[in-house]
Amino acid sequence: MSVAAVPAAQVQALPSTRELSRRRAITRFRWSILGPLIALLVFVLMPVLFLQLYFSLHQWTVYLGTWWDAEYVGLELFQEVLTDPRFGWAVVRSLSFATGSTIGCFLIGFALAYLMYKPFRGQAFYYIIFILPMLTVPVVVAYTAEMMLYQSGPLNDLITRIIGIEFKPAWLTNPHIALPTVMLLEIWNWAPFSFIIMLAGLTAIPKEPIEAAEILGASKWRIFWEVQLPLLRPVIFLALVLRFLEAMAEFPKTWALLQGGPGTATETLPVYIFLTTWQYFQISKGAAMSYIVMLLMVVIVLFAIRLLRREKRSLDTMYAKAAARPQELA
Amino acid sequence: MARIELCNLTKSFGAVVAVKTLNITIEDGEFVVFVGPSGCGKTTTLRMIAGFEDPTSGEIRIGDRVVNDLEPRDRGLGMVFQTHALFPHKTIRQNIEFGLRMKKVPPAERAQRVREVAEMVHISHLLDKMPAQCSGGETQRVALARTLVTNPSTFLLDEPLSSLDAKLRRELRAECDRLHEALKRTFIYVTHDQEEAMTLADRIVVMRAGEIVQTGSPMEIYSNPVNYFVADFFGSPSMNLVAGEVLQESSASRFRSARFEVALPKHFRTAKPGATTLGIRPEHVAVTRDGKGDVELPVRLVEPLGKDTLLYFDSGTERAFVAVTEGLDMADIKVGERIALSLDQRRIYLFDDKGQRIGNAK
């Protein structure tokens, strides 16, 4: 940038000393911000990615020889992964887990935010309470849940007492319920995140359009539906996208609680990759899998960025201050 | 029908009292302007009438109904806000239509009425645009149309023009005036701009620190201010206010300040001697070049405006003493020149040390 700026500046008048020192300061600032990031990329991320690529193209198993002597197998491992039905199911599980928990987090987070966005007495107290789950370490969430959820455990007992009918779902051992159970834990754990984003979004909506709607005769529901929701669209997208990406990568709770079981009922992508790599020691297959998952995530992220950009643009035009333009005669 | 009464209306936010026992009756069809510096409680009052703020105590009556517990939408009012109040994601047509849709007016009638009001405020060409594509003036016209279309008994306008530039402001001011004439509805208008208040109001309510200082027609407020605050607030350029003292001598009363000594008219004979502020509007100060006058002051600044020329004199205080002269005759006066001024005796105001008006000049 600064390099490109020099010839252009020479063509025009010579820049003043003040202008030069300003440019230098901007350049310095830019590098001091970007420098560490680039270093991280070059010295940590890139080697890992290359190593990973190397592994995914060479058949290496930990207990069979050294990794630099591993046999080159081309794209064989990728083929193996892509034709592995277990991998396919892991993708399906991860996608449904992420979708379900994202929707759950969003609905609960949004509902709480809607209850909270107008100031009231004791707001800070509720805020802290609602945030608390997010501040709990996922592994702790998992172990606490394990204690709560075993079949004759406190939760089932409590529900049985309340409704007066025997209530005994096997939260953790029934293969049909196990994944939804983890999903519920994920929702409990991360709904606060959606709550914070939606709260910020709701408080940021200017109050005039809402009051205008109110005095024009709109009910609370109408105002929500016709004014608040459309104005929140960009924020909603952000909350959904961020949560979805996080949920795709959820590992600690699933692993600590069920290690992919019962059977393969909770074997999501991160769990399957971990199992392949560190339980079956198929480092190369794990690497190939990781690459495929990474590509999948890149596609999702690019799509998300496009969506977010479009939303941001529409937000910008919505709020573009008419006053910022020369005012033609009305 | 839409007579609005505020009885002992009070609003406090925590320890801060924004509005103090306000009492006023606004007649049906009247154009009332609440005016005062920011923080004087005028907007809070308007928002209480609209129903966005609950009064801490006191009553609001619309017609004969106490509306304290009614939702804003049930009060039959329309409101125009300062900024940002259009729905940014709806077209102008959808914006205007919104109120009718909420009242379940059938589509054909809706379209008809939208067309009518759009014509009325000259925005027919904008109907299919988005708010972000409209200029500031257009936006406020749309806001007016959106309120008009629901046919409210009373219009509440909260500084609707303050985000516009001077020219547009004048234009839309005329528009408001025209609408009031045409609709014969009650208008309650809040502004901090004394000029808007003067030009629009049937009656001005001057507020300060949560209380009404004075109510009256623009002319009354202008020519008969009850205190220093009102005198200072209205008029542009504002009234000359010179701190000094009143001397009661055997033959006459005099006013004396640092640079300045004038005889006072007879009706100030009863004024108590002591610290006093003299006020006189710039247009009541005559500038004479022949040296004959009540006082002689050095010129600090000359501002030829074309139609008038403003002369700023050094009165010995920070605030300049201003005189208005017609045309450009005085535009060649040099800074530092000493010029004689004569004050119109009938137009001299005096304010005591608490800012209250002394005597009643007529």
Image (tube, coloured by chain):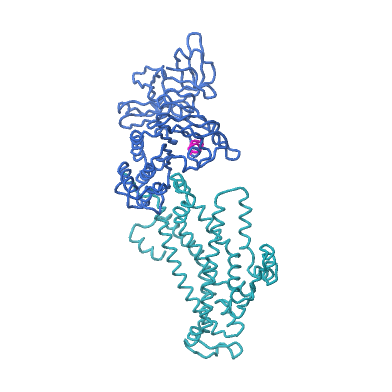
Chain colours: A cyan, B blue
Name the side, left or right, on which A69 lies relative to A234: right
- Classify residue B127 as left or right of residue A251: left
Quarter of the rendering occupied by the C terminus of chain B: top left
Side (left or right) of B147 relative to A97: left
Residue B279 lies, in percent from the top left, at 45, 23
Compare residues B85 and B98 and report the one nearer the observer: B98
Say above or below: A230 vs B328: below
Q: Is residue A226 above or below residue A53?
A: above
Count of numbered marks: 0
Query: Front-most of A285 and A13?
Result: A285
Q: Which residues are magenta?
A: B39-46
List x then y, in percent, for residue A35.
Answer: 51, 67
Residue A136: x and y in percent read 64, 64
The image quarter in which residue B148 lies: top left
Residue A34: within the magenta? no
Q: Main secondary structure of the magenta part?
A: helix
Q: Is residue A288 above or below residue B58?
A: below
